[in-house]
Image: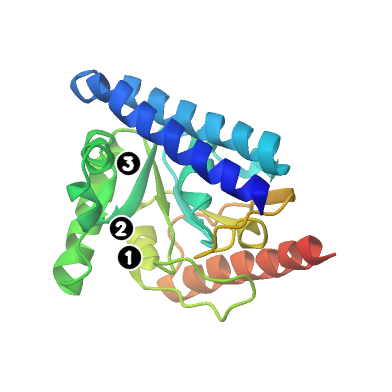
Amino acid sequence: MLRSVIFAAAFYVVTGLMLIGLSWLLLAPRSWAMAGLKLHARIILWLLETIVGTKMEVRGRENLPPGPVLIVAKHQSAWDTFALIPLFADPAIVLKDELKWIPFYGWFCVKFRHILVRRDKAAVALKTLVADAKDRVADGRQILIFPEGTRMAPGAEPDYKPGFVALYDALGVPAVPLALNSGHFWPRRQLRRYPGTIVVSILPPVPPGLPRKIAKQRIEDAIETESRALNSEAEV
């Protein structure tokens, strides 16, 4: 627990100092700001390993096609929102719109040109999501979406929202399922962190152009099957 408290303090101090100290990047080219975002992730991952003993292992990098793709990821922990960023060339993350009002953090979300979605107006939000994602794909970026919309405890009944299927159907790019077991080591709504190895598994892409129902089933089955295996691995 002591290590967890020390890490939490280090996390917030480093994050705060970087947000303020690198605020000039808000006026710099977006690529510079994205480099700062990846640097922050790498520093936090190093602190997590050094203080708590939590490492990261990435499997299946060869399954990630070059160029724009749709990454459909399991979401178990706040860890996912920063640790996955350095794995991709130029990711645009689907986030809730209200985050943009948080000083510095929200301003940077706008600077990064993440995809900010209002969840209170579902029909309008879906159209905006698709339109913004098309814009980012046209720039050659990767779209990262957590299809369950919130952190789910390891082993919880999955609850996939329809947004990722709409994106798959509209974007015409491969969909890459991504499974992980971060919730075992960085549990949601808890301060305590646990030593071990968080595994991120990048799975074979689902090609574009399949019927929506088939694509949906293939993506969900791939994520859930691999997530169950990774959960079992973490529990050993």
Q: Amino acid at mark 1?
A: Ala
The quarter of the picture where the N terminus appears is bottom right
At x 62% / y 49%, what residue is drawn? 4
At x 36% / y 72%, what residue is drawn? 162
At x 57% / y 52%, what residue is drawn? 205
Query: Upstream in the sequence, badge 1 or badge 3?
Result: 3
At x 78% / y 68%, what residue is drawn? 232
Question: How many neighbours does mark 1 have within 10 angstroms: few (below 14), some (14-19), or many (20 or more)?
Answer: some
**Residue 185 lies in quadrant:** bottom right
Viewer can see residue 89: no
Q: Is residue 82 left or right of residue 171?
A: right
Mark 3 → mark 2, Cα distance in angstroms: 11 Å
Q: Amino acid at mark 3?
A: Val
Q: Position of residue 10 (x, y in %)?
A: 52, 36
- Residue at image mark 2: 170
Q: Position of residue 28 (x, y in %)?
A: 23, 18
- Furthest-bottom residue in this view: 157
Numbered label attached to residue 166:
1
Numbered label attached to residue 137:
3
Labels 1 and 2 touching (C-beta < 8 A): yes
